[in-house]
Structure formats: structure tokens, C-alpha cells
Image (cartoon, grey):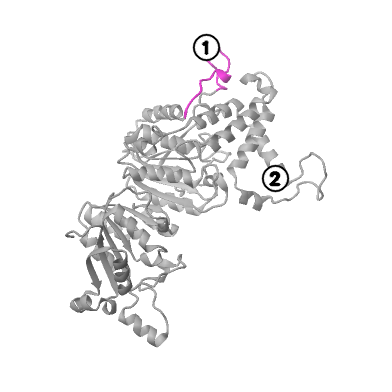
């Protein structure tokens, strides 16, 4: 952090993310190594990068798996239903404790992008640049439908036991299924076709059995299973619920909500193949900002990796963000 | 100073602290000059990602959009000036866009290279090549379609759609008096100022 505390960038992580945004000296890769690090757009040599685990998650912040001080047992479903705004409020306490009056930028994708927008609207004069990507100002019917089906997968695992499973078997099967469903929504038809096609995994011939035969089936199994080793099923419930509840509009109007943001500069980014948070959602945000004469830039990156595009290596994304950030004097 | 003469003149004419929308803003050189010299708050619209990146580098707000969709996101009279420079030839429905410009902006400035410029006619006569652009060719290699644009054609077009031209500037300026009489022949670049109603400019 520089002396004037003017170079702080706050990054918000998404549903299954953590504060480990950048590998740094650890053995484990960061979730946004493509964008954070020396020479990257969120340059660790130039900026003070902050990323905190969100409320309700299981990577350090209080969540359903944390011990309730009253009962001395994990909260489970007794944990309060939280909103994106609650999550943002908690992180605000962190920023206040670091005594940062004005952040240079806030950014994040997907659920992280929702936190970005909520922060911008809740704390209008605390940030110079706002960079939401692959996100929306409200969860769509589509988002809610997919989130609910994922939650149903967890509920229907008998091991879930009403959220009380910390002293017995975890609802691994339910969480695995939830993640498999989620994972499909993070990809695109094109990228899946390119990667797997109709290729078979184990056997060169079709077996005419109910078994895992196609490469894409094996891939999903692998992704689902490895997720269960690192994430808590109840956290998945609470965070997807917070996503569903997210709606930044005031009486149905987004422009009203953005009115206090006159002195902020926005860079809204969407990805052409993202069908979970499509470009139309980004355009609604841009429209609401334009209606208020707020400084807004918008780019739709042409890439075929679907919703997950913001996490993978992409020169256009790096150039756009770098150029935008470099125009701010520290 | 901007290299392109039409942009330099436009930047001199626009008053300080105006709100400007630059349609097809390219690398943002006009908005950059206006921000620096005239304290202008501008917004650019540009379809090419590479040029959007250039604008962002200079701190210019730019929205990546296709102008053929019109200006539906903008409220009436939300800008003092709307600029359409060296872009009209790439618009598939120019009447629609100009109508939108007149709705959204108080004043509109349109500039284009005149294909009927006498030098272009000479080149065509001797080389059989239509000189399509007087500026860098790499500036427009994203576009496939280009309308043939001449001063005469534009004047006829404005007449048929009842667009009121309140001022015009023909470049190069050295043939100033002849330019006004024979603009289709003598002007390399034309700048037109349009307004919705016929008022003093």
C-alpha cells in the first residue's frame, strides 16, 4: 500500500471462491492468477490487492460450519439467511479497519460482481473505479431456477440431515450433483463440444449400460467429486440463496439505484458466450448508468468459454482492464 | 493539436465544459483533446475492441456498441454535441441514425471525406481506382460495407429528410470562396452542423 493509501484494489470472490485470489508464495494456485500478480492487470507490484473470504463461506469467514458460541455446535441451518448486502457490510468493516478512505477500484465476477455493484450503491464515495464483470444487477428467473435445482440436490441427499451433518457423514453425493449442475452453467455449448464432443472415455464402443461412458460424463464426475473435498454443502445453500435474493433495483428501476454515483467511473464487462449472466444483463447496468450521466465504459469480450471466461487466460480482458486502470493517477 | 484537420476544427468549435457524445470515436483523439483543452465530459461509442482499448488507455469512457442499433439508451437532449466523424459511410441506415442524433443531442456535427473531390476524380480517371479513404486504411479494416459519400449526395439526402444544416465547413480551407460555390468538386473533407430546429447556431 502506498503512503496516501490511494492504490488499494478490493477483489470480491464468487460462490466457491476464497481469499486466495493469487498464488503468491503458496503451493496452491490462486483463483484469479490470470488477472492478479506482478505484471498482471491487478498488478501486485503496483497496487495493494485485498480479497476477503465472504460471510457464509467455509474458508475462514463465519458460516454454517462455524461454531455457534451459544450452542457450542456448528450453526448448520440455524445460521441466519444472509444477503449480498450483509456480505458487503462485513467486508466494509475490514476496509474501515485498514483505514482506507477511498479504494482505487473494486472488482469481481459473477457473485463477486454482485458484491461490487452492491458496494458501489451502498458506499458511493468510497471508490474511484468500479469494474463488475460477468454479472447482473439482479438474479434472473433462470439463475433462481438453476440455484434451486442445485439446492434440491443437496436437500435430497439423506446425509444432509436437515443441515446437521458435521458429526456424521457429509452429503457428498448431493453436493457433487449440485456442483455438476452448476458446472454445466459455467461452460458454453461450444466449449463443451470442442473439449469433449461425443468422445468416449474408457471403452471404444458403447456399452448399453447405465454407466459413465462419455468423456463429458467423466469430466463432470471428476469436477463434482473434487469439489466435495473442499467445500461445505450448507455454505452452498446459503450463498446461492443470497444470489437469488439479490436485486439492486429500486421499485423495479435500476437507474434510481445508481443515482448517487456521480463521481465514480465504471467499466462493465460481459462475455459473449456467458449464458448464465448474459450480455443483456450487463447492458441493463450500462443503460442505468448512462441514464444518470455516470462515466461508464462497456466491453463485451468475444470468447467461447461461457460464464467461466473471466477466470481463464484472455489477452483482451487483460488489455481492457490494464488500460482502464492505468488511466488513473495514483 | 490533432493531426486530422476535421477533428482539429471540431475541437476548436466546441465550447468548454460541453457534454459530448462521439459516435465512432476511433482511438479517442477528439475526446482526449476536448477533455484536455476544453474540460469536456465526453463519451465515445466504438465497435472495434482494439480502438476501445486505446480510448480506455487515455481515460476516455467508451461503450463498445454497434451504431446501427441507434441511440436507444440515451434520453432526449442529453448531450450538447453529438459528433459523427468519418463514420457516416459505414452506417447502413444513415437517416435513422441522424434522426436519433437530433433527438439525443442539441447540436450535431457530421464530417466525412468527399469522394467527389477533384483529386479523387483525377486518380480514378487515370488509375481506375476509387479513392475510398483519405485517412489511414487500417483505421477501418473492420468494416465490410461502405456507402459512397459525396457532398452533393449528402446535401440531397438532408433535403429529402428535411434535416436542417445550419453551418458547413469545407476543407482544405485555402480555396475558401471557391469551396462554397463548388464544394462537391473542391472539398476534400466536409463538416456539417445540424440542428433539429432552424435557430441561430
Is residue A243 inside the magenta stretch? Answer: no
Please determine whether, in this image, residue A28 is positioned above or below residue A206: above
Q: Left of A204 or right of it: where is A179?
A: left
Number of marks present in the image shown: 2
Pinpoint residue A202: horizontal percent, then vertical percent: 78, 46
Residue that label 2 marks = A216
Q: CA distance from mark 1 to mark 2?
A: 46 Å
Is residue A75 inside the magenta stretch? Answer: yes
The chain under label 2 reads A
**Secondary structure under the numbered disc 2 in the rendered image:** helix
- Residue found at x 42% / y 67%: B140
- Residue found at x 54% / y 46%: A274
The chain under label 1 reads A
- Residue found at x 46% / y 50%: A39
Q: Left of A160 or right of it: where is A124?
A: left
Q: Looking at the image, which is closer to me, A70 or B9? A: B9
Residue that label 1 marks = A70
Amino acid at each position: 500500500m502506498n503512503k496516501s493509501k490511494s492504490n488499494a484494489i478490493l477483489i470480491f470472490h464468487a460462490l466457491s471462491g476464497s481469499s486466495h485470489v493469487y498464488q503468491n508464495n503458496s503451493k496452491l494456485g490462486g483463483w484469479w492468477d490470470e488477472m492478479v500478480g506482478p505484471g498482471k492487470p491487478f498488478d501486485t507490484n503496483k497496487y495493494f490487492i485485498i480479497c476477503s473470504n465472504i460471510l457464509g463461506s467455509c474458508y475462514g469467514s463465519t458460516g454454517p460450519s462455524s461454531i455457534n458460541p451459544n450452542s457450542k455446535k456448528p450453526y448448520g441451518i440455524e445460521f441466519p439467511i444472509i444477503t449480498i448486502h450483509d456480505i458487503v457490510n462485513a467486508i466494509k468493516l475490514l476496509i474501515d479497519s485498514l483505514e482506507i478512505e477511498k479504494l482505487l477500484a473494486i472488482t469481481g465476477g459473477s457473485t463477486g460482481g454482485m458484491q461490487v455493484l452492491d458496494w458501489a450503491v451502498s458506499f458511493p464515495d468510497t471508490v474511484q473505479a468500479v469494474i463488475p464483470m460477468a454479472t447482473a444487477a439482479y438474479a434472473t428467473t433462470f439463475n433462481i431456477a438453476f440455484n434451486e435445482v442445485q439446492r434440491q440436490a443437496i436437500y435430497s441427499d439423506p446425509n444432509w440431515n436437515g443441515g446437521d451433518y458435521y458429526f456424521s457423514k457429509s452429503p457428498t453425493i448431493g453436493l457433487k450433483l449440485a456442483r455438476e449442475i452448476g458446472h454445466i452453467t459455467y461452460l458454453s455449448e461450444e466449449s463443451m463440444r470442442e473439449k469433449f464432443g461425443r468422445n468416449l472415455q474408457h471403452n471404444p464402443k458403447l456399452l448399453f449400460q447405465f454407466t459413465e461412458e462419455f468423456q463429458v460424463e467423466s469430466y463432470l464426475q471428476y469436477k463434482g467429486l473434487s469439489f466435495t473435498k473442499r467445500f461445505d454443502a450448507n455454505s452452498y445453500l446459503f450463498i446461492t440463496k443470497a444470489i437469488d435474493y439479490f436485486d439492486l433495483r429500486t421499485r423495479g428501476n435500476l437507474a434510481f439505484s445508481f443515482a448517487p454515483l456521480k463521481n465514480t467511473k465504471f467499466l462493465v464487462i460481459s462475455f459473449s458466450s456467458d449464458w448464465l449472466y448474459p450480455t443483456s444483463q450487463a447492458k441493463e447496468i450500462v443503460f442505468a448508468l448512462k441514464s444518470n450521466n455516470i462515466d461508464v465504459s462497456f466491453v463485451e469480450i468475444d470468447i467461447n468459454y461461457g460464464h467461466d471466461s473471466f477466470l481463464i487466460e484472455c489477452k483482451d480482458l487483460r488489455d481492457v482492464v490494464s488500460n482502464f486502470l492505468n488511466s488513473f493517477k495514483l | 493539436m490533432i493531426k486530422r484537420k476535421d477533428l482539429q476544427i471540431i475541437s476548436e468549435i466546441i465550447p468548454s465544459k460541453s457534454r459530448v457524445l462521439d459516435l465512432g470515436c476511433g482511438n479517442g483523439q477528439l475526446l482526449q483533446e476536448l477533455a484536455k483543452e476544453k474540460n469536456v465530459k465526453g463519451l465515445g461509442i466504438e465497435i472495434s475492441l482494439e480502438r476501445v482499448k486505446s480510448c480506455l488507455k487515455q481515460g476516455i469512457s467508451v461503450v463498445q456498441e454497434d451504431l446501427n442499433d441507434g441511440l436507444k439508451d440515451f434520453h432526449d437532449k442529453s448531450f450538447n454535441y453529438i459528433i459523427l466523424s468519418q463514420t457516416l459511410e459505414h452506417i447502413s441506415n444513415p437517416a435513422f441514425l441522424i434522426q436519433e442524433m437530433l433527438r439525443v443531442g442539441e447540436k450535431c456535427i457530421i464530417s466525412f471525406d468527399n469522394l467527389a473531390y477533384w483529386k479523387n476524380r483525377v486518380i480514378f480517371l487515370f488509375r481506375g481506382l476509387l479513392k475510398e479513404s483519405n485517412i489511414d486504411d487500417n483505421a477501418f479494416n473492420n468494416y465490410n460495407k461502405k456507402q459512397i459519400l459525396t457532398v452533393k449526395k449528402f446535401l440531397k439526402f438532408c433535403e429529402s429528410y428535411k434535416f436542417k444544416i445550419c453551418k458547413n465547413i469545407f476543407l482544405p480551407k485555402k480555396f475558401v470562396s471557391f469551396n462554397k460555390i463548388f464544394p462537391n468538386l473542391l472539398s476534400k473533407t466536409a463538416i456539417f452542423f445540424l440542428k433539429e430546429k432552424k435557430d441561430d447556431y
